[in-house]
Image (spheres, grey):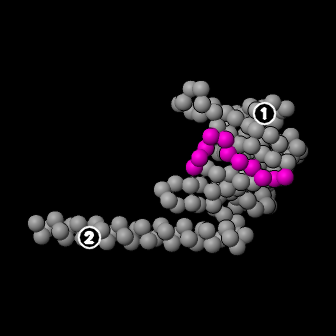
Amino acid sequence: MLHDRRTSLILLAATSLLGSALLSGCGAMADTWERGLPMPGFSVTGGTAGEDPGKDYVPSMEVDPAKLVGGWEEPVPGQPGRFQGYRLNKDGTASSINMATLAVNRWSVKGDILTLYGDSIGNGITIPFAMEYLIEEVTPNTLKIRQGSLEHHFEKVL
C-alpha cells in the first residue's frame, strides 16, 4: 500500500512539473505573439514562418494576392462528403472553414509563399501560429499548395 502511494505521489509530481513546463511555454508563446515577434510555425523557405523568406530563397513565381481572395475548400481526409478550407479576404483577414480548432484570422502572400496566421485551440489552451505554404498552382477555380511533403488541392467556393 505504501509503495502504491509513493508511486502515485511521484507520478503526480512528475505530471505537475510537466504541466507547468508546458503552460509556461504556452505563456511565453502568447507573450511573443502579443509583442509582435515571429511565432513558431512551419517554414517552407528555411527562415522562421511569418518572417521574410530565408536569404537564399528565390520564389519560382510572384503570385498576385487578388487571385487568392475567396473561399477555398478541399475534402476532409477520411470523411466523405465533408469539406474544410479557408476564406481569404481582400483586406488580409481570413477565417477557417469547418476547422473549429484551427482559427485562421489573417493571411499574406510574398512571392510564392502563402502565410496563414491564427490560433490553434484545444484542451483549454490557445496557441498562436504562422503556417507557410508553397503555392504550386493557382487558377480562377483551383489552388494547389504544399507544406513539406503534404499537398493540398483546393477548389474555389462562393
| Residue type at the position of mark 2 | Ile
Q: Tell me how far mark 2 sits from mark 1, CA to CA.
A: 56 Å
Residue 43 shows in this picture: no
Residue 78 shows in this picture: yes
Which residue is at the far left? 1
Q: Return the x and y of residue 17 as percentages of the image width and height.
A: 39, 72
Left or right: where 148 falls relative to 112: left
Q: Quadrant of residue 50?
A: bottom right
Q: Return the x and y of residue 60 as percentages of the image width and height.
A: 83, 44
Is residue 71 depicted above or below 100 in this figure? above
Q: Quadrant of residue 96?
A: top right
Local SS, label 2: helix
> Counting residues from the N terminus, which is met first, the one under dot 2 or under dot 1?
2
Question: Where does label 1 land, which residue?
Answer: 158
Residue at (44% x, 71% y) in the render? 20
Q: Return the x and y of residue 130 as percentages of the image width and height.
A: 68, 57
Q: Return the x and y of residue 13 as percentages of the image width and height.
A: 31, 72
Front-most of 37 and 45?
A: 37
Residue at (40% x, 68% y) in the render? 18
Front-most of 34 and 7?
A: 34
Residue 10, disc: 2
**Picture quarter with the N terminus:** bottom left
Is residue 22 depicted above or below 101 in this figure? below
Task: Identify the magenta region.
Answer: 91-101
